[in-house]
Amino acid sequence: MFDDFSELHRLLIGDSPAMIRLLKRIRRLAPVDITVLIEGESGTGKELVATALHRFSRRSRRLFVPVNCAELTETLAQSELFGHERMRNDVPVDVSLNIEVSFNLGK
């Protein structure tokens, strides 16, 4: 967690009123265990906001996997994000997730 904006400002820079409101929202939402939908135009920093929310959350020690939902069809998005059930005789026998994780190792 964080006590002031200094560490948060390393991820998201700016001091406009809109940016200050965003930073305050991130600070308020990060410690809460809820789902957050981040919307915005291409190139506006949605992934940076998601990274900040994750970094300052209770889940910060776990893996963060950004997903660009615009690249997925609706059916594929549902399967990738929420899993799919294998059926046998109309009865679910297994639920699995298919999220492919790629790592950027700075190479």
Image (spheres, grey):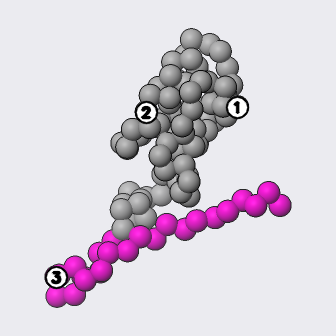
**Mark 3 highlights which residue?**
90
Amino acid identity at mark 3: Asp
Q: Is residue 106 above or below residue 83?
A: above
Which of the 4 image quarters holds residue 106? Answer: bottom right
Amino acid identity at mark 2: Leu
Which of the 4 image quarters holds residue 43? Answer: top right
Q: Is residue 52 visible?
A: yes
Is disc 3 placed on a helix, strand or loop? loop
Q: Residue furthest front?
A: 3
**Mark 1 highlights which residue?**
10
Q: Residue at x 36, y 68 (%)?
A: 83
Name the image quarter holding the C terminus: bottom right
Is disc 2 placed on a helix, strand or loop? helix
Label 1: how many residues lie within 10 Å, few (<14), some (14-19) or many (20+)?
few
Q: Is residue 39 above or below residue 23?
A: below
Is disc 1 placed on a helix, strand or loop? helix
Whichever of labels 1 and 2 marks the residue nearer the N terminus, that label is 1
* Distance from the alpha carbon under mark 1 to that under mark 2: 18 Å
